[in-house]
Image: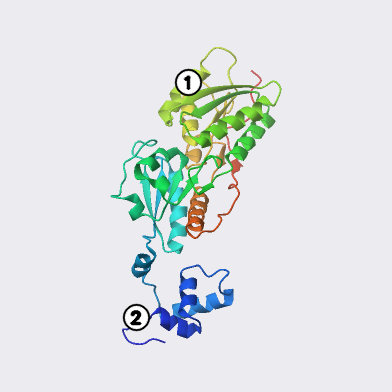
């Protein structure tokens, strides 16, 4: 045991564990897998704990040419979803000695100014939502190790992509509504140029047009409750048979659809079934509570950060989309006879 005021060193840990200093560096730098055994790694960690050893991160970062700082670029902080993404990413980052800087595009979606004198000098890597991809050009984030979230794997800017299984979420919604007997549908689509919303529209069209006797109309709406209310009200009041089910790209749009229905004297779900997508706190704050697809935002952030760590270490990130889950509540019911 090291006594007195002298700070324990990696050599002290190596001596206590009976290993080389190189092995200590591998274990405490979380790069030991495939190089030292699990038993040796645990012995090193135990020795470090007993000695109270803390690595000199500043010296190590200078030696490696790393800042151990990651930028998370999101379109906006107007919903809790991206706060959840940040929470998950920051949790994994902290466990590996990294910090995460959260950077929302000032206008929600579109170009943004570089918040650093030089992002390439200030950052080790970037995690970015596809809805904020334009911001990457300004900060030159596309020239750093990059992981894209909600992005087309076939055309992604990043070294890796991490996606939620949005297509399966739409499939679950359509099967639920078709099973209730609905055949006239309105898609309240977010008026946002983004791969994730393109997937929703494409999957919805594919699923519903394959069922004989169904109709599908689309109304595009700004990404706000007020914009959704206006778009839904105009679509529901248009001539012709009224839809019996309204499928919204997001819970916020669904809240706007609720307001539109009430202004038109329609009851949810008696006259109009409504679904969302996200399962935000808003989904249980409105009445009736919203049937929606639950997206695990924190797991999304965790997977994004793990993928970036893999890229930085030259490993292949885990593959496979993150599963999603339909949560059925009071906003959906069989269509009324009338």
User: Badge 1: few (under 14), some or many (20 or more) residues near its Cα, within 10 Å?
Assistant: many
- Residue drawn at (40%, 38%), measured in percent from left and top? 134
Tell me the quadrant of the picture where the C terminus can be found. top right
335 sits left or right of 294 in the view: right
Q: Is the residue 181 above or below the residue 285 in the image?
A: above
Q: Is residue 252 visible?
A: yes
- Which element type, helix, strand or loop, lies under badge 1? helix
Nearest to the eye among marks 1 and 2: give it. 2
The disc at residue 302 is: none
Position in image of residue 194 (x %, y %) = 48, 34
The disc at residue 233 is: 1
Residue 273 figure quarter: top right
Tell me the quadrant of the picture where the N terminus can be found. bottom left
Q: Is the residue 176 above or below the residue 62 in the image?
A: above
* In-front residue for pair 262/85: 85
Residue 169 figure quarter: top right
Position in image of residue 155 (x %, y %) = 53, 39
* In-front residue for pair 310/132: 310
Residue most extreme to the top: 239
* In-front residue for pair 81/90: 90
- Which element type, helix, strand or loop, lies under badge 2? loop
Q: Is the residue 18 above or below the residue 217 in the image?
A: below
Q: Which residue is mark 2?
A: 7
Mark 1–mark 2 Cα distance, whole angstroms, equals 68 Å
Coloring basis for residues:
rainbow
User: Badge 2: few (under 14), some or many (20 or more) residues near its Cα, within 10 Å?
Assistant: few
139 sits left or right of 173 in the view: left
- Residue drawn at (42%, 83%), measured in percent from left and top? 12
Position in image of residue 19 (x %, y %) = 50, 82
* In-front residue for pair 113/283: 113
């Amino acid at each position: 045991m090291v006594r007195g005021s002298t700070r324990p060193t990696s050599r002290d840990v190596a001596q206590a564990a009976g290993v080389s200093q190189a092995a200590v560096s591998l274990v405490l730098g979380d790069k030991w897998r495939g190089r030292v055994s699990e038993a040796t790694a645990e012995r090193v960690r135990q020795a470090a704990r007993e000695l109270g050893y803390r690595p000199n991160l500043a010296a190590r970062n200078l030696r490696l040419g790393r800042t151990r700082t990651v930028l998370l670029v999101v379109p906006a902080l107007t919903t809790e979803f991206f706060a959840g993404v940040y929470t998950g990413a920051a949790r994994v980052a902290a466990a590996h000695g990294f910090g995460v800087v959260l950077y929302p595009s000032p206008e929600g979606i579109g170009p943004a100014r570089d918040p650093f004198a030089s992002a390439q000098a200030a950052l080790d890597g970037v995690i970015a939502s596809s809805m904020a991809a334009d911001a990457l050009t300004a900060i030159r984030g596309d020239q750093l190790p990059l992981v894209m979230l909600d992005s087309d794997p076939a055309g992604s800017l990043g070294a890796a992509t991490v996606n939620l299984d949005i297509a399966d979420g739409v499939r679950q919604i359509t099967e639920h509504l078709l099973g209730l007997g609905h055949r006239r549908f309105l898609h309240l689509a977010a008026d946002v140029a983004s791969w994730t919303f393109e997937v929703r529209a494409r999957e919805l069209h594919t699923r519903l047009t394959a069922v004989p006797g169904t109709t599908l109309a689309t109304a595009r709406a700004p990404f706000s409750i007020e914009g959704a209310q206006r778009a839904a009200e105009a679509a529901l009041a248009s001539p012709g048979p009224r839809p019996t089910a309204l499928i919204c790209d997001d819970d916020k749009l669904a809240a706007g659809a609720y307001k539109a229905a009430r202004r038109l004297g329609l009851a949810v779900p008696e006259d109009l079934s409504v679904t969302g997508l996200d399962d935000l706190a808003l989904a249980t704050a409105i009445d009736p509570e919203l049937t929606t697809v639950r997206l695990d935002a924190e797991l999304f952030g965790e997977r994004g950060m793990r993928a970036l760590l893999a890229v930085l270490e030259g490993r292949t990130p885990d593959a496979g989309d993150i599963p999603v889950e339909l949560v059925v509540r009071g906003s959906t019911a069989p269509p009324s006879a009338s």
